[in-house]
Image (tube, coloured by chain):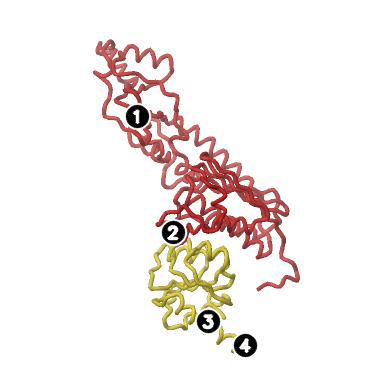
Chain colours: A yellow, B red
């Protein structure tokens, strides 16, 4: 699916869409950035509570397409600036990682069903 | 009055980076000539003449208690009290600098005050050096020369071309989470512009990011050096201490000495060195209290025509 489809989840608020057509093919949940670095697949959407600039750096380095900041954490201006620069989309949600991942999974499955 | 013709706000980025990175202790004079409070102004004049200096710190042990400048000596000669002891006429309200401050502080001080030199104290309030604007200009000239050489080397590179014999040094400061990841991002961009295969870029990004974060989180500051050969990328992370107490343990996944605050940011899970080692083709580490050096290399391979990318 594409990044813009994440905006159709009513619990997700898009605060920065860098490239609405960028591909999302899977997801990853994690707050340990070293673990995200080592294991998050490219073209994934990352569910995390790490609402700071360094998350953008990690996302950019491993090729993560979008972030979903969970548990209602707020995104500061410096993180947003970094997201613009590195072209990473950011959504925020009050859902936790598990609930947010379930929404993303539903979208991915719907996308798969549509293409087959 | 002599001023240092560099301002600490709008100068070229390379210069700004330099004056914030260089510490006063890196440029100050550490061979100190001092006198005690009982020394006569005449003796001080003699010391100044012999040592070719224009200001003398007055100390009790390692503690700075005053300063006698050439101006004080001239006044003493003028008014006939040159045989008096230093303690009767020395300046006691001194403006001092600390050895851990960046030299930007010193530049601002030389601009703001009319003094030609400042005493430098360490964190135990002991006198450890003197700094003059000449010390600063010399250090800046040496560093700027080195930066220019690097820029010249960089400007010779062909954008998007193949990689060969390029070398970049990135300076990384302790606890600078603000700029953390910059070096790794630059390395990634360079590999991408040379059409290196994505799986290889990812491994290089992981290794460089982990080593970069280690310098930010654990060291007193250091540098990341990326050397691009025709088919190998070598990344060297060098810091200036305090060293890893147990290197074998640090290479075990899950071993960490990070603080709670650092962990709350998502770092310090004890995966840095193991991650870097697992993605590298070669991995070497040496550590002592003077510093840690980690060198990793990754064999580069271009995107192949038939590569089946996910």
In the image, is B146 to the left or to the right of B282?
left
Question: Residue B290 placed where, x, y %?
Answer: 52, 39
Question: Residue B193 placed where, x, y %?
Answer: 65, 60
Mark 1 — residue?
A: B115
Q: Depth-wise, is mark 3 or mark 1 nearer the camera?
A: 3
Q: Which residue lies at the image location 47% right of the left edge and 43% below the top edge?
A: B21
Tag 2, which chain? B
The residues bearing labels 2 and 3 have C-alpha atoms spaced at a distance of 29 Å
Locate the N terminus of chain B by quadrant: top left
Q: Residues within 10 Å of mark 2 (few under 14, many from 20)?
A: some
The residues bearing labels 3 and 4 have C-alpha atoms spaced at a distance of 16 Å
* Labels 3 and 4: the sequence-earlier one: 3
Q: Quadrant of residue B203?
A: bottom right
The answer, for residue B233, to whether it is visible in the render is: no
Mark 3 — residue?
A: A105
Mark 2 — residue?
A: B263
Q: Is residue B183 above or below residue B87?
A: below
Locate the C terminus of chain B by quadrant: bottom right
Q: Which residue lies at the image location 50% right of the left edge and 34% below the top edge?
A: B139
The residues bearing labels 4 and 1 have C-alpha atoms spaced at a distance of 76 Å
Question: Residue B60 placed where, x, y %?
Answer: 31, 23
Name the disc covering residue B102, or none. Answer: none
Q: Depth-wise, is mark 2 or mark 1 nearer the camera?
A: 2
The residues bearing labels 2 and 1 have C-alpha atoms spaced at a distance of 45 Å
Same-chain check, marks 3 and 1:
no
Q: Nearer the viewer, residue B219 or B285?
A: B285
Task: Verify CB contact (< 8 Å) between mark 2 and mark 1.
Answer: no
Same-chain check, marks 2 and 1:
yes
Q: Residues within 10 Å of mark 1 (few under 14, many from 20)?
A: some
Mark 4 — residue?
A: A115
Same-chain check, marks 3 and 4:
yes
């Amino acid at each position: 699916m594409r990044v813009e489809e994440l905006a159709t989840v009513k619990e997700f608020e898009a605060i920065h869409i860098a490239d609405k057509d960028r591909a999302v093919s899977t997801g990853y949940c994690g707050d340990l950035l070293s673990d995200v670095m080592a294991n998050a697949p490219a073209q994934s959407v990352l569910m995390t509570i790490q609402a700071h600039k360094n998350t953008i750096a990690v996302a950019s380095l491993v090729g993560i397409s979008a972030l979903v900041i969970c548990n209602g954490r707020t995104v500061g201006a410096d993180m947003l600036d970094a997201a613009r620069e590195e072209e990473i989309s950011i959504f925020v949600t009050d859902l936790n990682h598990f609930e947010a991942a379930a929404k993303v999974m539903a979208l991915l499955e719907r996308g798969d069903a549509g293409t087959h | 009055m002599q001023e240092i013709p560099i301002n600490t706000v709008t100068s070229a980025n390379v210069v700004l980076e330099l004056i914030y990175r260089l510490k006063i202790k890196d440029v100050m004079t550490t061979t100190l000539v001092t006198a005690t409070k009982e020394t006569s102004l005449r003796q001080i004049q003699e010391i100044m003449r012999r040592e070719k200096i224009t200001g003398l710190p007055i100390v009790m042990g390692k503690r700075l208690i005053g300063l006698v400048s050439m101006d004080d000596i001239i006044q003493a000669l003028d008014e006939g009290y040159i045989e008096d002891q230093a303690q009767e006429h020395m300046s006691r309200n001194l403006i001092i600098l600390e050895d851990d401050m960046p030299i930007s502080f010193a530049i601002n001080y030389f601009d703001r005050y009319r003094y030609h030199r400042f005493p430098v104290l360490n964190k135990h309030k002991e006198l450890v050096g003197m700094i003059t604007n000449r010390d600063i200009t010399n250090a800046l000239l040496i560093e700027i020369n080195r930066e220019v050489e690097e820029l010249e080397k960089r400007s010779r590179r062909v954008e998007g071309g193949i990689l060969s014999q390029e070398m970049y040094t990135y300076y990384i400061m302790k606890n600078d989470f603000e700029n953390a990841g910059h070096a790794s991002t630059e390395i990634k961009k360079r590999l991408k512009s040379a059409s290196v295969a994505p799986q290889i870029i990812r491994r290089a990004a992981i290794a460089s990011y982990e080593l970069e974060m280690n310098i930010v989180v654990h060291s007193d500051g250091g540098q990341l050096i990326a050397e691009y050969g025709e088919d190998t990328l070598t990344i060297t992370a060098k810091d200036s201490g305090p060293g890893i107490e147990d290197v074998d343990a640090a290479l075990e996944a899950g071993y960490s000495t990070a603080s709670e605050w650092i962990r709350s940011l998502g770092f310090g899970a004890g995966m840095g060195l193991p991650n870097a080692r697992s993605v590298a083709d070669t991995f070497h580490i040496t550590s002592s209290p003077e510093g840690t050096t980690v060198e990793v290399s990754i064999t580069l391979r271009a995107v192949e025509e038939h590569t089946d990318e996910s």
